[in-house]
Image: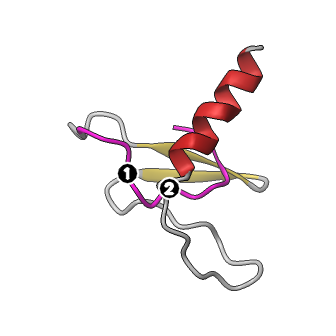
Amino acid sequence: MGKIFFWGILLASCARCQALPAEPGAAPACPPQCHCEEDGIMLSVDCSELGLSEVPANLSPLTAYL
């Protein structure tokens, strides 16, 4: 149940994401103020200690950790 909830939240938050055109095989976009690391095809995005008031709008749909 926890994994389903996580993916539901992730998909709902990505509904607001703007799709960026990317070349096949290109690295997923990382919000400029955050630090990102790729883990296979998934992306870990670290926006900690930035004082953000909302989730960055340009997160990759492949973001597995925020």
Is 57 in the magenta?
yes
Element under disc 1: loop
- Residue 27 at what x, y percent from top left? 64, 71
Front residue (pair 9, 59) = 9
For the residue marked with disc 2, what is the amino acid?
A: Leu
> What range is drawn magenta here?
53-66
Residue on which disc 2 sits: 59
Q: Is residue 26 visible?
A: yes
Q: Is residue 48 above or below residue 43?
A: above
Q: Quadrant of the N terminus?
A: top right
Which quadrant of the figure has residue 52? top left
In this rendering, the count of numbered labels is 2
- Residue 64 at what x, y percent from top left? 65, 41
Residue found 48% across the figure and 67% down from its top: 18
Is 13 in the magenta?
no
Tell me whether circle 2 and circle 1 mark residues in contact (CB < 8 Å). Answer: yes
Residues at marks 2 and 1, CA–CA distance in whole angstroms:
6 Å
Q: Crowding near pointer 1: few (<14 within 10 Å), some, many (20+)?
A: some
Q: Is residue 54 above or below residue 42?
A: above
Q: Is residue 12 above or below residue 62?
A: above
Q: Taken as a whole, is the magenta stretch helix, strand or loop?
A: loop
Residue on which disc 1 sits: 56
Indicate left or right for 44 with 48 as reference.
Answer: right
- Residue 30 at what x, y percent from top left? 48, 61
